[in-house]
């Protein structure tokens, strides 16, 4: 069986390793447009801030390991430019030699990931503008930040990456301004959660410019529809888009943003072709439809399951609940399921139950405030989502809620869970159970 995988990072190499372990006769070729395989993109902001010493530290396995130890034909600087599902052929270009190539396949995996969106602002091509998605992006940003002339840094966009980059560049002693087109940062959370992140940013001297649209970047300035801001360096973090443009002529089913629609076995609408990771859809268990929430955890899971199915080992991808967590200075913020905006858009009846409590027994000397919010359907009692924020413990509560969502639990059933208790780590009633009791 001849396997071709396009993309040598999380999803692609997770699939490749499953094929290696389950098909002793496998002929595996991996095409990677860059020159680095299998690294942790989520760790890159912490390399910028110096918490992680080098981009080398986020590389899980080097390309030589895949070649020598596992017998994979792992190619670098090989970009796939087209796929013909009828003839089962991949076309591409070798950027080392400048020559074109073609490859036939029996099974093909698209694991091309996603790229940062860079809007067509005036001055977008300026050398002062940076994105953070790959190791080369990160190394270029580090070099830019090392210049003595760089004092004022403007970050456009306040999602996960924007906020993590803001914190880490702040560690370097730079002045930080975040420009956000909406009225609050971290719009993946409800406003009552993101307001706490807003306050945390201001406590650390980060300037927030809300409700501003960037128009141009020129001559050391970022010009918006409201103000002009000084900037020695700009980081754009306004979202990502799937790397699937080269597949447009295949007729493969995709979402409007280009994410490839897959079934529970990670198969696309084209026979013999699979897709996984940031270029594919992710079935949302609460919304009950394909969604696009690109995260490293999902990419690794989907890659593993795609690899198993490609070599005949039947395994289903059960779906996601949209679970995520981030650290921002002294706060941990986490979420799973639907936000209030999500349920409003879906037209689902809902109520919320929010509490301000402590992350452990209230009398314990290191107990810190923890805000927990539950969203549920008042008719059925079914949990729809949850968010938490505090210095400690938000991630523990959200992981419990993610498991509850996976099992379609009700708000009342949360009270019945047997959760751990000891004064240094929790109260007698866990915060999510306190919120559930308030709801019921």
Image: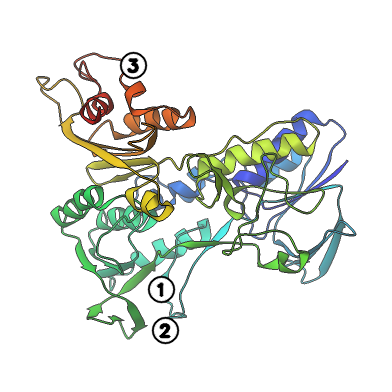
Locate the C terminus by quadrant: top left
Identified at 46% across, 60% down, the residue is: 139
Q: Is residue 357 above or below residue 202?
A: above
Q: Nearer the viewer, mark 3 or mark 1?
A: 3
**Residues packed near mark 1 inside 10 Å, few (<14), some (14 to 19) or many (20 plus):** many
Could you say where residue 2 lies in the image, as x and y percent from the top left?
86, 45
Could you say where residue 6 lies in the image, as x and y percent from the top left?
71, 54
Residue 103, quarter of the rendered image: bottom right
Q: Which residue is mark 3?
A: 416
303 left or right of 175 in image: right
Marks 2 and 1, the one that precedes in the sequence: 2
What label sits on residue 129 in the rendered view? 1
Q: Which residue is mark 2?
A: 123
Q: Are marks 2 and 1 in contact (CB under 8 Å)?
A: yes
Could you say where residue 384 lies in the image, as x and y percent from the top left?
39, 38
317 left or right of 433 in image: right
């Amino acid at each position: 069986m001849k396997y071709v995988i396009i993309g040598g990072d999380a999803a692609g190499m997770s699939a490749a390793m499953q094929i290696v372990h389950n098909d002793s006769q496998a002929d595996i070729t991996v095409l990677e447009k860059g020159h680095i395989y299998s690294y942790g993109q989520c760790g890159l902001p912490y390399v910028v801030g110096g918490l992680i010493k080098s981009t080398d530290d986020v590389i899980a396995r080097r390309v030589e390991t895949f070649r020598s130890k596992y017998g994979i034909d792992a190619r670098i600087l090989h970009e796939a430019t087209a796929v013909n599902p009828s003839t089962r052929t991949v076309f591409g270009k070798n950027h080392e030699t400048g020559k074109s190539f073609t490859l036939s396949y029996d099974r093909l995996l698209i694991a091309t990931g996603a790229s940062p969106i860079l809007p067509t602002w005036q001055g977008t091509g300026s050398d002062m503008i940076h994105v953070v998605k790959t190791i080369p992006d990160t190394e270029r940003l580090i070099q830019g930040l090392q210049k003595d002339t760089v004092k004022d840094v403007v970050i456009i966009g306040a999602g996960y990456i924007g906020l993590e980059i803001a914190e880490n560049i702040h560690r370097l002693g730079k002045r930080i301004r975040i420009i956000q087109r909406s009225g609050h940062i971290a719009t993946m959370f409800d406003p009552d959660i993101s307001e706490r992140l807003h306050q945390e940013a201001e406590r650390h001297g980060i300037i927030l410019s809300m409700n501003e649209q960037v128009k141009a970047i020129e001559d050391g300035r970022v010009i918006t529809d409201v103000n002009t801001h000084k900037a020695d360096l700009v980081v754009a973090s306004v979202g990502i888009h799937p790397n699937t443009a080269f597949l447009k002529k295949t007729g493969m089913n995709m979402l409007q943003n280009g994410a490839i629609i897959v079934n529970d076995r990670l198969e696309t609408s084209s026979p013999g072709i699979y897709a996984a990771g940031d270029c594919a859809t992710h079935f949302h268990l609460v919304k009950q439809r394909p969604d696009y929430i690109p995260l490293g955890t999902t990419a690794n899971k989907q890659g593993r399951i795609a690899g198993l199915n490609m070599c005949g080992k039947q395994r289903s991808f059960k779906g996601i609940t949209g679970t995520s967590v981030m650290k921002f200075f002294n706060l941990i913020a986490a979420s799973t399921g639907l936000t209030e905006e999500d349920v409003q858009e879906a037209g689902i009846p809902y109520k919320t139950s929010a509490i301000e409590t402590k992350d452990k027994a209230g009398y314990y000397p290191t107990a810190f405030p923890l805000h927990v919010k539950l969203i549920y359907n008042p008719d059925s009692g079914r949990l729809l989502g949850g968010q938490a924020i505090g210095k400690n413990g938000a991630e523990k509560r959200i992981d419990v809620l993610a498991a509850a969502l996976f099992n379609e639990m009700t708000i009342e059933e949360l009270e019945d869970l047997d959760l751990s208790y000891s004064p240094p780590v929790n109260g007698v009633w866990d915060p999510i159970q306190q919120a559930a009791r308030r709801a019921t």
